[in-house]
């Protein structure tokens, strides 16, 4: 008797009423044997519902990941339209060296034309002696146009035409390097830019000076 009751309970667990006629049918049946109505699968067993859940999970994971990247990017250099990574703090490690754009002052070149004299701080963090102009390449822009490098009068402060640009320094040593750029006028801001010389790393250090 007990065995029969267990059998009946198992059978009832595998049965459900037909939504059309109410007759008990197997949960695995595709149609009701009494009225012929199709037996629909529960929504959570349908393929489209499972795919929808998977897509939703992927979207949530992607959103969380991008949110984390956005928060981290607040403390990272920005990317320019050219693909270069721009650090506008005026100071950074580039490759095996450190550079700081320290100052910029108005002066005159040897022809008497206005010029900007920019002072850089250069630290060699590499393993071999290296000069500033072999570690970095510098540019200055005024109104978006590149300013040409020039020579200033030798009696302008401690500057001479060679300065420390080509002097090699040993690892751990820091020196100041001066570079002069010819200006179009003495009122427009000058944007100074430093990048690595002969490198695939497009990171740039920039600083803008107003006169």
Image (cartoon, rainbow, N blue to C red):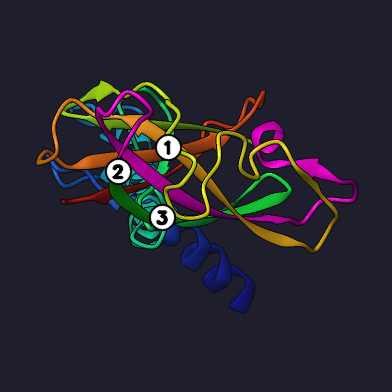
Magenta range: 107-135
SS at circle 3: loop
Q: Residue 152: image x %, image y %?
A: 42, 35
Determine if the magenta segment contains residue 92. no
Query: What's the distance in space between the residues labelled 1 and 3, CA to CA?
Result: 26 Å
Q: Residue furthest bottom?
A: 2
Which residue bears the numbered disc 3? 90
Q: Nearer the viewer, mark 1 or mark 2?
A: 1
Left or right position of 62 against 154:
left
Q: Give the answer, above or below, for where 15 lies relative to 9.
A: above
Q: Give the answer, above or below, for where 193 lies relative to 98.
A: above
Q: Residue 148: image x %, image y %?
A: 37, 21
Q: Give the answer, above or below, for where 124 lies relative to 26.
A: below
Residue at image coords 71%, 36%: 166
Which residue bears the numbered disc 1? 153
Left or right position of 47 against 3:
left
- Residue 110 quadrant: top left
Residue at image coords 37%, 34%: 51
Q: Residue 126: image x %, image y %?
A: 82, 51
SS at circle 2: strand
- Disc 2 packing (10 Å; few <14; some 14–19; many ≥20): many
Is any part of residue 129 visible from this angle? yes
- Residue 39 quadrant: top left
Q: Nearer the viewer, mark 3 or mark 2?
A: 2
SS at circle 1: loop
Query: What's the distance in space between the residues labelled 3 and 2, CA to CA?
Result: 21 Å
Which residue bears the numbered disc 2? 107
Q: Residue furthest front?
A: 155
Mark 3 and mark 2 lie on one chain; the one further toward the N terminus is 3
Mark 1 and mark 2 lie on one chain; the one further toward the N terminus is 2
Contact? badges 1 and 2 (CB < 8 Å): yes
Is any part of residue 25 visible from this angle? no
């Amino acid at each position: 008797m007990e065995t029969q009751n267990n059998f009946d309970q198992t059978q009832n667990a595998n049965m459900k009423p037909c939504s059309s006629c109410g007759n008990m049918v197997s949960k695995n049946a595709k149609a009701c044997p009494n009225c012929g109505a199709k037996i629909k699968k529960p929504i959570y067993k349908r393929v489209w519902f499972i795919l929808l859940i998977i897509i939703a999970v992927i979207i949530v994971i992607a959103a969380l990941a991008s949110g984390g990247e956005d928060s981290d990017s607040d403390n990272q250099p920005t990317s320019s339209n050219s693909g270069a990574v721009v650090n506008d703090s005026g100071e950074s490690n580039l490759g095996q060296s450190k550079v700081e754009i320290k100052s910029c002052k108005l002066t005159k070149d040897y022809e008497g034309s206005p010029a900007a004299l920019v002072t850089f701080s250069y630290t060699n963090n590499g393993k071999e002696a290296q000069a500033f102009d072999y570690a970095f390449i510098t540019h200055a822009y005024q109104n978006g146009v590149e300013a040409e490098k020039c020579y200033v009068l030798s009696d302008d402060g401690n500057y001479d035409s060679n300065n420390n640009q080509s002097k090699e320094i040993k690892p751990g040593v820091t020196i100041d390097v001066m570079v002069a750029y010819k200006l179009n006028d003495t009122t427009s801001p000058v944007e100074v830019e430093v990048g690595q010389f002969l490198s695939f790393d497009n990171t740039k250090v920039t600083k803008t000076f107003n006169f």
